[in-house]
Image: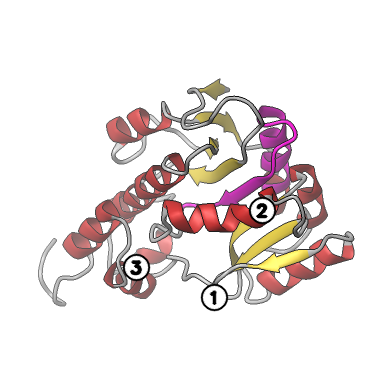
Amino acid sequence: MITGSPGGRRSGQPGPALLVLAKSPVAGRAKTRLCPPASPREAARIAAAALLDTLDAVCAVPGALPLVAWTGSLAAAESRAELTRALRRVTRFDQRGDTLGERIAAAHADGADHAPGSPLLQIGMDTPQVTAANLAEALAPLSAAVGPDAVLGPAADGGWWALGLRDPRAAKAIASVPTSRPDTGEATLRALRAAGLSVAVLPELRDVDTAEDALAVAAAGAGRRFSAEVAALLSRPAGVAR
């Protein structure tokens, strides 16, 4: 499935692509590590807010082609009306592959089909604090005439929040890297370098996995929707009904 249309891309020379690997924020399937203290539906609402803020940032990068590799039911998502409108601003296609590593590699390859000859930066929906300026800075080394083959943004939990490649199809080098481990970031960096790629390391960011993460990221000034949902759903004293 391919939906939507490119937004924010200039004519002429191909610009970079920004890819969001996204999972539909369905109750019981999204941000389950927020439960407790959040209920499954509240966790999905927070996930939807994070995704919407992320899409705003991606679509605000001048000259970049916004892409979304999607999995899950949009019809069952929290904030589905707002998400449906937001996804019309991007080119959306389905994720492929069994493991997360395989889906990442396939999404980069599919992104290359939509943006031939362009560098691509991929993020997820776990860093709602990211801004258009952050993304433009991360893309800059890949668009320079002389620069690294890849950029990797480490996450505070040992994973990574961004992967950018001058040749997106080179993401096949990390297809077998185990994910959701404290050494995933280091293993990804080793795999990229073992494939002969030069890698620049981006600033570290904190992923939102737990309620503690969500509160910290919101307090540090994340996107407006995410911060509002976290304040409403996670910032109540113990014993106060939601």
Q: Quadrant of residue 81?
A: top left
Residue 97 in view of the camera: no
Horizontally, residue 162 falls left or right of residue 134, namely right
Q: Earlier in the sequence, mark 2 or mark 3?
A: 2
Q: Earlier in the sequence, mark 3 or mark 1?
A: 1
Identify which residue, 137 or 116, lies in the foreground: 137
Horizontally, residue 170 falls left or right of residue 229, namely right
Percent across and percent down for residue 134 are: 48, 59
Crowding at mark 3 (Cα within 10 Å: few <14, some 14-19, many 20+): many
Percent across and percent down for residue 156 are: 52, 76
Residue 168 in view of the camera: yes
Tell me the residue that label 2 is attached to: 164
> Residue type at mark 2?
Gly
The residues colored magenta run 104-125
Q: CA distance from mark 1 to mark 2?
A: 19 Å
Crowding at mark 1 (Cα within 10 Å: few <14, some 14-19, many 20+): some
Identify which residue, 51 or 80, lies in the foreground: 51
Q: Which mark is residue 157?
A: 1
Query: How many numbered marks are there?
Result: 3
Tell me the residue that label 3 is attached to: 214
